[in-house]
Image (cartoon, grey):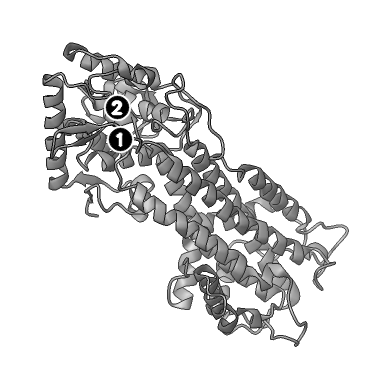
Amino acid sequence: MNNIVITGKDLTLEQIAAICRGHAKIELAEEAKQNIIESRKVVDELVAEEKVVYGITTGFGKFSDVVISQDQCKALQKNLIITHAVGAGNPFSEDIARGIMLLRINNLVKGFSGIRLETVQTMVDMLNKGVTSFIPEKGSLGASGDLAPLSHMVLPMLGLGMAYYEGELLPGAEAMKRAGIPTIELSAKEGLALNNGTQAMTSAGSLALYDALNLLKVADIADALCFEAQNGVVDALDHRVHDVRPHSGQLATARNLLRLLEGSKNTTRQGEIRVQDAYSLRCSPQIHGASKDAINYVLDKVNIEINSVTDNPIIFKEDRAGISGGNFHGQPMALSFDFLGIGVAELANVSERRIERLVNPAYSDLPAFLTPHGGVCSGFMIVQYSAAALVSENKVLAHPASVDSIPSSAGQEDHVSMGTIAARKAGEIAKNVRRVLAMELMVACQGIDMRGNKGLGKGTQAAYDLVRKQVATLDDDRELYGDINYCEEIIENGSLIKAVEEAIGGAIETR
């Protein structure tokens, strides 16, 4: 595979996933290298001339009015990193930590940060050789950048902190030594160039977004299986219904369901069995569609953020200016990632309702809890409990983080975004949604078998076959967590989407 070339201009969500999860290698574009070199010249000149520029020749935050002499510049930058590395809690997963490093590189190569090329190359070498900084996931306010997480990212570069290498957590100096990467000493502006940005929240949120986009497809697949199991009325999917209310996500969902169900002999028309279905089936284009629209709004914001400059100060080489602004403030992403969490949570809300309609005999003509031996067997009774617990947890997690703010740095930083909390929550919500959808896949396939399968649609047949490859129809009770684990695995590894898309001859739409 060719290296992914980092330009600072055109990084995509798919490339982030390939680098962070697939360990694709990266290299710096020649233009990017030149941008870094030219930007660095400006910093060196400002230091030599003893110009007063925030974070280069002054202290930080409340200490911005303290002027730093030229011979103190290196100590200033190192002290910034070691004092700001005060994160808490469990570490970010390695894919998120790699994303933090990648996104910071993509910011730096734009040439507005004043960092040295060799410092950026150290980060590139770490990504390519598998040295991943140990970064605690808590402790960022999401303004003045993700200061604590990004400082932990830098520590191994200095021979400090902790890092993962070849599956082992090591002291940072040892990890760098084993990988054959020299440690560095920070120069003027470099500490601030490395730890002042939105990359922790954007990495966590971007990977949650990547998962959410796939869950949009899985939700439509699971929904289609429920149409099969419930003899769903497909008139509600008629394009004319949606054309007169043309929200793009709604239209896409209706099209998806019709393609997935094409050829089905289990679905019905209006009036054949009943006039209309409950909302969880009949309104699924509107419900799933709204989540599509919300998640695509977030995608548009992420595409901007991952290719943006989030430093302070920003170095403009044309007029040798270092302007102190607020691009480190995470508010655009904080609101977006709160919206992401809400949008993806709704997929599980309606999924759990479809599970309930399948297992509850009050809502269906299927056997109670989809077991042929009710009483001695509980069937899928507690599957719905577990789904309900996850959905309820998501309701707590979906409370927006961005509505909160606590002033910091003696009131100098008097409004903060809490965007990293929003991003982390969105990731947790997506994991819970994936589990609920795995349960729905399993329960829907059981419902199809209990009703008597007259013939599935093109897409639903592929999904059903993949589930049944390892999950047998439930006759007598057995341990179900392994079946759910398998259904979750085929969601996570992409094999479910791949099988279904091959069967229907094209991609399931997400917008």
Could you classify mark 1 by the number of other residues whose Cα lies within 10 Å: few (under 14), some (14-19), or many (20 or more)?
A: many
- Assess whether mark 1 and mark 2 are in contact (beta carbons under 8 angstroms): yes
Residue 251: x %, y % from top left? 53, 74
Q: How many marks?
A: 2
Residue drawn at point x = 63 percent, y = 69 percent: 284
Q: Which residue is mark 1?
A: 311
Can residue 289 be seen from the camera position used here? yes
**Considering depth in this image, is 372 or 5 the residue closer to the camera?**
5
Note whether 321 is above or below 469 in the view shown. above
| Residue 128 appears in the rendering | no
Q: Nearer the viewer, residue 128 or 336?
A: 336
The answer to which quarter of the image holds residue 203 is top left
Left or right: where 501 falls relative to 150: right
Q: Earlier in the sequence, mark 2 or mark 1?
A: 2
C-alpha span from label 2 to label 1: 8 Å
Query: Which x, y percent locates residue 270?
Result: 71, 85
Q: In this view of the protein, which residue sits in the foreground, 245 or 438? A: 245
Residue on which the image places disc 2: 192
Q: Amino acid at mark 2?
A: Leu
Image spot of residue 297 (x, y percent): 46, 57
